Image (cartoon, rainbow, N blue to C red):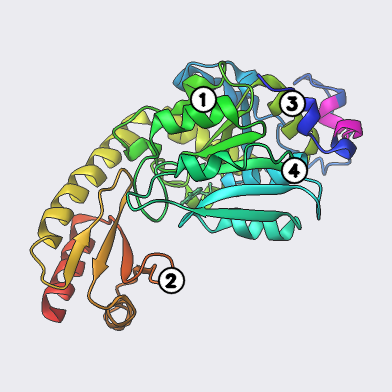
Amino acid sequence: MINIENIVRPNILELQPYSSARDEFTGKEGIFLDANENPFGEFNRYPDPYQKELKQKLAELKDINTNNIFIGNGSDEVIDLAFRIFCSPGFDKAITFSPTYGMYDVSATINNVELLKLPLNQDFQIDIEKLESYFNDSSIKLMFICSPNNPTGNLINKKDIEFILNNFKGIVIIDEAYIDFAEADSLISLINQYNNLIVSQTFSKAWGLAAARVGTAYANEKIIKLYNKVKPPYNVSKLNQQAAINALDNKNTYKDNLNLILSEKKRLKSKLQQISLVKKIYPSDANFLLLEVTDANQLYTQLVNQQIITRNRNTQVANCIRITVGTQKENDELLNALKTLS
Ligand SMILES: *Cc1c(COP(=O)(O)O)cnc(C)c1O
């Protein structure tokens, strides 16, 4: 166990958070003349600042307490708030493992925090021996581990993550944006054991709600309280909360689509293996495949010319493109295009 107060920015520890009208009166019934809202209209009232209905449904789904849940405006807000809570700009640092999701770097730069990037090894796993020397640097407040990792698609070894949780004295954020597609359990079950662990998930991928911007963080209550203190009061709109609630009320749609994506992924992978310009397909626990091809820059442009848009990841992993699993029809069009280009 680490002492969370010791790694929080001093000004955030001292912060008196904004107290909204809905903080000061939490009842549902009454004549509301307290928030300068317009009395007319459908979306005239401020949304629930703590998203209680959504959290109640998530708590049941994840089998945890609502006090262990934070909802953000996408997981991008979960990332940004972590910098703002824990890292003093221009002084503290964060650490991650490359290649990985680009937002950690962008968010670090916006917050004027240096992000150290240790290369993953050949299997895209963390090099624990190299990492150990950083454990003594008390200015490193945050560590981002993306698992399954974007763009490589693999899970990070659980025993390595547990070693880190036991030895790193800062906050560890496990970004599980793709965990629904993985053949492994979420690490949410570890939040009661490690008080420096934040697990972030999202409604943007398996739940099909990228447009709605709803991200989640699971952590011990102290960390969740800090998030609530720093977040903008009404950070998740009522429309967005409702979209997530509706998705949770339609779990069959979620499951059916998830199964479709997983079976398409399997089919796409086996067909891609027969195409000569595909040199290698990396193992994936996500809803995308990372392919090594003969010339990624060239192939990317050729596909764009046929109105098939993939992600060129050549600068991150040489000659690799990342392909999201689409519908059967979309995947067939991709396969046909690749066959004619081979
Ligand atoms: C897509 C993705 C997210 C999702 O971000 P949102 O802001 O919730 O849409 C988070 N992390 C990773 C690694 C991703 O690839």
Upstream in sequence: badge 1 or badge 3: 3
Against 259, residue 5 (above or below) is above
Q: Which residue is mark 4?
A: 139
CA separation in Å, label 4 and label 3: 14 Å
Mark 2 residue element: loop
| Residue 236 can be seen in this image | no
Q: Which residue is mark 3?
A: 4
Kind of residue at badge 2: Thr
CA separation in Å, label 3 and label 2: 37 Å
Upstream in sequence: badge 3 or badge 2: 3
Counting every numbered tag in the picture gives 4
Against 80, residue 170 (above or below) is above
**Which span of residues is magenta-colored?**
13-23
Callouts 1 and 3 close, C-beta under 8 Å:
no
CA separation in Å, label 1 and label 3: 25 Å
Q: Which residue is mark 1?
A: 58
Kind of residue at badge 3: Ile
Question: Is residue 14 or residue 20 the one in the foreground?
Answer: 14
Residue depth check, mark 1 versus mark 4: number of the one nearer the observer: 4
Determine which of the numbered discs, if any, sits on residue 315 in the image: 2
Upstream in sequence: badge 4 or badge 3: 3
What residue appears at the point 7 percent right and 63 percent down from the top-left corner? Answer: 274
Kind of residue at badge 4: Ser
Let me know if residue 21 is in the magenta part: yes
